[in-house]
Image: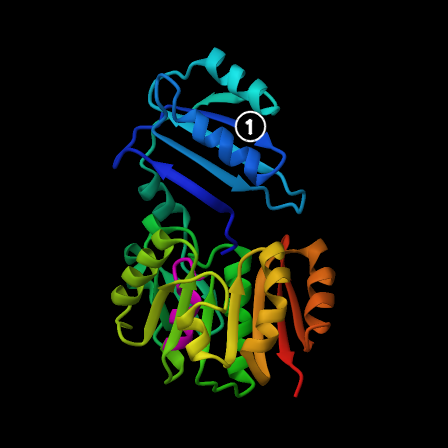
């Protein structure tokens, strides 16, 4: 799924969060500095995080979470120091979020692929390709329009005869896309992410799906990383991230895909899609398919011969 979370800290294994304090920063640098200063508050937050707002505005949300009522005056001082709006403080009722997610997240079908949690193991269709993703690892479960769009696009390529042997999932999150590829094609698949925590989650999912040795999960940023460079060129690249990184990676993508190979891109708001298409066409690609699910667009492009 798109990478909305840029940085997240959690100081308790089982925090009972009672309050949140949220504000908006104009850019990532201000958000990161404010997030760091939040750590010095008393009472101390159980977790802090910054998240890019997924509307193309360049704004970042800053959040802090507390088990005790936060110091409103201290938050106001920090907001003033960093030139942001006052924090919105809210009380959060206690909830078993994993159980809640399990109840709310029904299995997802995307063509031949069936994404499910263990609690729905009895619902597997007989002729599906099962992909197990636990609710506790809920970024990249297949429910978000971006992940679902990528799975549908891949299913369509397979239906058209795609049988490439060199595939990578960039910004893999749970590695659901890499696992989809490894489940239906014989070659080894690479899954990369800049976040070591995401890669740990990906490894756990790969093992849980019986794909150990079929999917290699690595921490990497960009195609200059040795693991990515050594495996190039690719028949197919998945990149379900955000518009900014997709645009920045376009020249590298152009050099990393085989002629007539494919890229499946998502994490793109509908209104951003034309700009992404223009950049990729300028870097040697042709648009094959454009699909939208609610607010999100998935693009399938092929490298010119």
Residue pictured at 39% horizontal, 64% vertical: 175
Q: Residue 186's spot in the image, x, y percent? A: 37, 85
Q: Residue 191, position in %: x, y?
A: 40, 67
Q: Mostly what secondary structure, the magenta segment?
A: helix
Q: Residues within 10 Å of mark 1 (few under 14, many from 20)?
A: some
Q: Quadrant of the C terminus?
A: bottom right
* Residue 178 lies in the magenta-colored region: yes
Residue at 62% from the left image edge and 56% from the top image edge: 243
Residue 288 sits inside the magenta stretch: no
Q: Is residue 92 visible?
A: no
Residue 154: x, y in percent?
52, 74
Picture quarter containing residue 173?
bottom left
Indicate how the structure is coloured in the image. Answer: rainbow
Left-right relation of 155 to 92: right
Q: Residue at x 43, y 60 (%)?
A: 193
Depth check: 241 or 155 in front?
A: 241
Point 41% across, 46% down: residue: 104
Bounds of the magenta segment: 172-182
Q: Tell me if residue 40 comes above or below residue 251 in the rendering.
A: above
Tell me residue 255's x, y (percent): 58, 77
Q: Determine the secondary structure under disc 1.
A: strand
Q: How many marks?
A: 1
The vertical placement of 90 against 173, above or below, is above
Q: Is residue 278 visible?
A: yes
Q: Is residue 41 above or below residue 258?
A: above
- Is 42 left, or right, of 75 in this rendering? left
Which residue carries the number 1 mark? 23
């Amino acid at each position: 799924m798109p990478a909305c979370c840029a940085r997240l800290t959690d100081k308790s294994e089982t925090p009972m969060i009672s309050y949140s304090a949220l504000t908006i920063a104009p850019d990532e640098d201000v958000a990161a500095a404010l997030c760091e200063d939040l750590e010095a508050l008393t009472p101390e937050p159980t977790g802090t995080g910054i998240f890019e707002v997924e509307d193309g505005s360049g704004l970042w949300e800053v959040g802090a979470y507390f088990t005790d009522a936060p110091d409103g005056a201290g938050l106001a001082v920090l907001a003033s120091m960093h030139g942001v709006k006052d924090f919105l403080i809210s009380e959060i009722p206690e909830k078993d979020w994993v159980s809640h997610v399990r109840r709310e997240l029904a299995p997802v079908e995307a063509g031949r692929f069936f994404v499910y949690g263990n609690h729905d193991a009895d619902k597997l269709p007989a002729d599906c390709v099962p992909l197990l993703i636990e609710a506790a690892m809920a970024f990249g479960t297949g429910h978000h329009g971006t992940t679902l769009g990528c799975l549908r696009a891949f299913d369509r390529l397979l239906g058209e005869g795609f049988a490439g042997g060199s595939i990578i999932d960039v910004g893999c999150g749970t590695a659901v896309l890499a696992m989809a590829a490894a489940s239906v094609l014989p070659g080894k698949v690479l899954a990369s992410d800049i976040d070591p925590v995401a890669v740990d989650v990906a490894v756990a999912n790969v093992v849980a799906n019986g794909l150990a040795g079929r999917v290699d999960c690595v921490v990497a940023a960009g195609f200059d990383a040795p693991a990515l460079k050594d495996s190039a060129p690719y028949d197919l690249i998945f990149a379900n991230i955000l518009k900014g990184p997709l645009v920045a990676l376009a020249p590298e993508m152009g050099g990393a895909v085989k002629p007539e190979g494919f890229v499946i891109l998502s994490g793109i708001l509908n209104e951003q899609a034309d700009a992404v298409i223009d950049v990729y066409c300028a870097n040697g690609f042709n648009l094959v398919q454009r699909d939208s699910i609610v607010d999100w667009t998935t693009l399938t492009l092929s490298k010119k011969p």
